Amino acid sequence: MRTDTPVPTRLQDYTPPAWLVETVHLTFRLDPEATVVRSEIRFVPGAGGDLHLDGQALRLLSASINGEAIRPDLHECGLTVLEEQLPDGPFTWVAETRINPQANTALEGLYMSNGMYCTQCEAEGFRRITYFPDRPDVMAVYTVRIEGAEPVMLSNGNPAGSGEGWAEWHDPWPKPSYLFALVAGDLRSVEDSFTTRSGRDVDLRIWVRDGDQDRCAYAMDSLKRSMKWDEEVYGREYDLDLFQIVAVDDFNAGAMENKGLNIFNSKYVLASPETATDGDFEGIESVIAHEYFHNWTGNRITCRDWFQLSLKEGLTVFRDQQFSADMRSEPVKRIDDVLRLRAAQFREDAGPLAHPVRPAEYIEINNFYTATVYEKGAELIRMLREIVGAEGYAKALDLYFERHDGEAATIEDWLKVFEDATGHDLTQFKRWYEQAGTPRVHVAEQFEDGRFTLTFRQETPPTPGQPEKAPVPIPIRWGLLGAQGEVAAGTFVLDKAQDSLIVEVPERPVPSLLRGFSAPVILMHEGAPGDRAARLARDTDPFNRWEAGRSLALDTLVQGADPQDWLDGTIAVAMDETLDPTFRALALGLPSEDEIARQIAETGRSVDPDAVRADRIGLDRKLAEALGPRAAELRAAMATPGPYSPDGDAPGKRELANRMLGLMTRLDPTAPEAPFADATNMTDRLTALALLVREGRGEAALAEFHAQWQHLPGVVDKWFAVQAGQAAPDRAVEVVTALTEHPDFNWKTPNRFRALVGGFAGGNPAGFHRVDGAGYRFVADWLIRLDKLNPMTAARLSGVFETWRRYDDTRQDLMEAELERIASTDGLSRDTAEMIGRIRA
Ligand code: ARG
Ligand code: ZN
């Protein structure tokens, strides 16, 4: 049992740094088990006071101030030198520490992955490398010397010399310690270049293991498109002579924006038609863009403290969403983003882990890299843009870059530039950053004497620590559909608890509200009978057209309503050749089991995961039956002969064709056999494989797939995930338990762990929630095991339990018992302890 209760860090306790840093010189003498780090730090007075340097898992070998050896006071989280022992003005601190990269399984700080050295310092990993004021408001210029036998030794910025056994790097841009990076190993590069619009030539290098060079082309192309887009749309140019990306296999997150040296989870770099799906290509494009965009939103302007995390993450997600929308289809991208928002963020907001976009306190900051900080944070920026208009937004962003370049800023600074640039008062808007929970907007309609009145009422349910909520400004884009098409449209900002919009129209129209999902709220609006079917048939806003179908499907899946309107409307969309195939595929998609469960919980009923699954399969089958032979015809019409392309309309055609295959398989379980055998790309191959496994006919295909791809970790991850997600729920625990014995189950690699354990808990809800509790036990066992090595990834997995209160008493009791067992584990990490504590509270 834990005895120490960690103290939370609070936003209101922020104090400026006592000492600032001008320059840092680091020398690394690399050794897998005993790397020595020499740091020479030039401190200058800040707010004044004692010198506190953060440090964790370090062995201090020596320390001096202005050349005089000292013995600082060491404590659990660092060291302190009292003010009276310090010189009055600037001074030079020199220290040597010893660290053990090989033993670093937490994958924070300097660690080894597949024989190479790499780092991850955000949020607080730099303190595992050397003693330092490891906080983002201390920005300094770094010079790095690396000594070792590795053929390639990299750090941030521009190269500053190299020779036999050493390399030096200099980064002229002051940066916080979380953006420091070092990589060393036997790496190969793929090179290209980019000329900025002011004529600077930038070398681009992607570093991978030998053999992976031919799978970097799409990442490189995405990088160049990102650089160009940021110049054209935001006026932002790159600012060094070199931009490097390194792909590593062992990585807790997706990727990291270290200045000039991004480090990526290899799944967001490596792709070829045979090894990556269309979704993987799209993911690479957006993550490459995201990390590149951080150079301005995150690196040049960083965060004052970690409470401001959404300042860089929300903004950068919004920017990468805009980029992808420009590269692909805007409405489709919006639907995808809303699906993701609801799946992760609405789920989070509805449960015990709900927190504001700017949290007020945390115990472990790594637990706040959440859908709320990232995705809801992006939604807030989208709303700001909606409220001040595209021009106002552009002006505000220009002012933001001009005013805060080189600074560590706050959410207040961010809102202030919008106020100053556009004249809007954003006092009330700030509540969006401070209040957790998803607002509900109720709508009442009235038509009388040529006046159509829409009355909106908003309400946000209580969330942990926030029983009462105040109204927030909600931009509601609306349109009214008459018999002949749209009769009126506009944006209404609901900033009171209740307010009305009145429009003069000759006939009662069909209202289309919250177009483009203009605010992250739950709209409680069915409208008159037949209105949703009408919107599904002819809404001029593509998002709401899709949303109408989704809402009809949910009526069936949540309330048991007659599915006829949904079936008719969806099939009409599916067969409409004037529509984008991706949009048609999205319209044919059913809400996930988890989404259905959330909606059921929303009505106050408890969720039966087996019934959810059965009803969903039942509706899918009805759709298959209603389509009949048209499914195969449509599939054939969507064939994409010729060489594979991850861009253009081919991915959408594949998606629609594969959706048809899924429906055909409901009626004929042998349908995926030929497509599996004939597939020439991973998108088609993996779809067919998943369908075969779903139908219990996957054995031979799985063996063949494994034999073909066992040498590529990213593909082996898919092989694990497909089995975890598609195994029949009543024997899924047995399937995944057996897979943990497979020689390829390298559970210390986060991608592999997430593929199997996460793929089961998140991808197979009915299996995870098996009523005997075996699924919960399996996940808890592995969570406890991983926590000892990698707290960050273990803590993240605990989110699979965040919905435990949705279920019946039996399941709740079983989950509670597992949460209790995890909580009382000896030596449980602070990360996981915080998560489990919040989930149980
Ligand atoms: N800043 C990185 C990104 O958004 C993610 C870093 C994740 N770090 C963490 N501690 N979870 O691209
Ligand atoms: Zn980011």
Image (cartoon, rainbow, N blue to C red):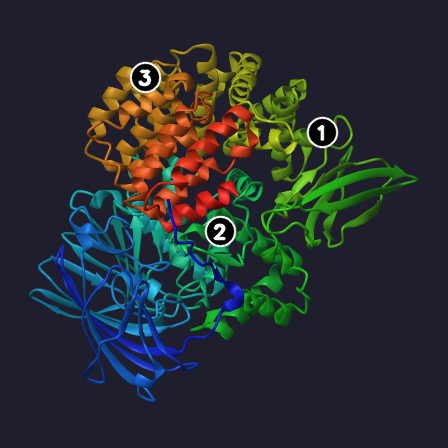
Report helix, strand or loop for mark 1: helix
Amino acid type of the residue tagged 1 in the rendering = Ala
Specify which label sits upstream in the sequence, 1 or 2: 2
Q: Residue furthest left?
A: 164
Specify which label sits upstream in the sequence, 2 or 3: 2
Relative to the observer, which residue lies in front, 646 or 775?
Answer: 775
Q: Mark on residue 698?
A: 3
Q: Nearer the viewer, mark 3 or mark 1?
A: 3
What is the x, y in percent for residue 824? 39, 41
Circle 1 residue? 534
Report helix, strand or loop for mark 2: helix
Is the CB of mark 2 within 8 Å of ligand 1?
Answer: yes
Amino acid type of the residue tagged 3 in the rendering = Gly
Q: Find the distance from the CA under tag 1 to the CA under tag 2.
A: 34 Å
Circle 2 residue? 374
In the image, is 172 to the left or to the right of 571? left
Q: Are marks 3 and 1 in contact (CB under 8 Å)?
A: no
Amino acid type of the residue tagged 2 in the rendering = Tyr
Graded by Cα atoms within 10 Å as few (under 14), some (14 to 19) or many (20 or more), the crowding at tag 1 reads: some
